[in-house]
Image (tube, rainbow, N blue to C red):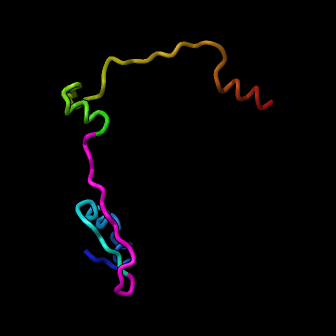
Amino acid sequence: MQVSVQEFKSHLSHYVEQAQSGVIELTSHRKVVARIIGVRQSDNTGVARLLAAGVATWQGGKPEGAELRLQERGKPVSQMVLEDRA
């Protein structure tokens, strides 16, 4: 698909979406000056890969149970920064 630079700028998000399924050639004065080649989205990253492998399950809600509680020890970082600046 060939698109002028001006048209591409005017409808950027539309053409970026179109690039995912093919190649867009940008033209200036009816000459091709650039090609945009889309990168197909992959669902095989991180959590999606674990879900696909059956290692993890998800019911669509927020994660539960892994609450992290920080214990106070020593000075707060903000206090150390203020002391360091003095």
Residue furthest to the bottom? 29
Name the residue located 26 percent from the left edge and 46 percent from the top edge.
Answer: 42
Report which quarter residue 78 is drawn in.
top right
Give the vertical position of 66 relative to 8 (above or below).
Answer: above
In this rendered view, identify the residue nearer to me: 46 or 9.
46
**In the image, is residue 38 part of the stretch drawn in magenta?**
yes
Report which quarter residue 34 is drawn in.
bottom left
Report which quarter residue 59 is drawn in.
top left
> Is the N terminus in the top left, top right, bottom left or bottom right quadrant?
bottom left
Q: Report whether 22 appears left or right of 85.
A: left
Q: Which residues are magenta?
A: 28-44
In this rendered view, identify the residue nearer to me: 78 or 49.
49
In this rendered view, identify the residue nearer to me: 34 or 79.
34
In the rendered image, is residue 6 in sight? no
**In the image, is residue 43 part of the stretch drawn in magenta?**
yes
Name the residue located 25 percent from the left edge and 36 percent from the top edge.
Answer: 48
Q: Report whether 77 appears left or right of 58.
A: right
In the rendered image, is residue 2 in sight? yes
Image coordinates for residue 63, horizontal then vertical, percent: 30, 25
Give the vertical position of 45 relative to 5 (above or below).
Answer: above
Give the vertical position of 52 relative to 71 (above or below).
Answer: below
Image coordinates for residue 37, horizontal then vertical, percent: 31, 64
> Is the C terminus in the top left, top right, bottom left or bottom right quadrant?
top right
Image coordinates for residue 25, horizontal then vertical, percent: 32, 74
Name the residue located 64 percent from the left edge and 24 percent from the top edge.
Answer: 77
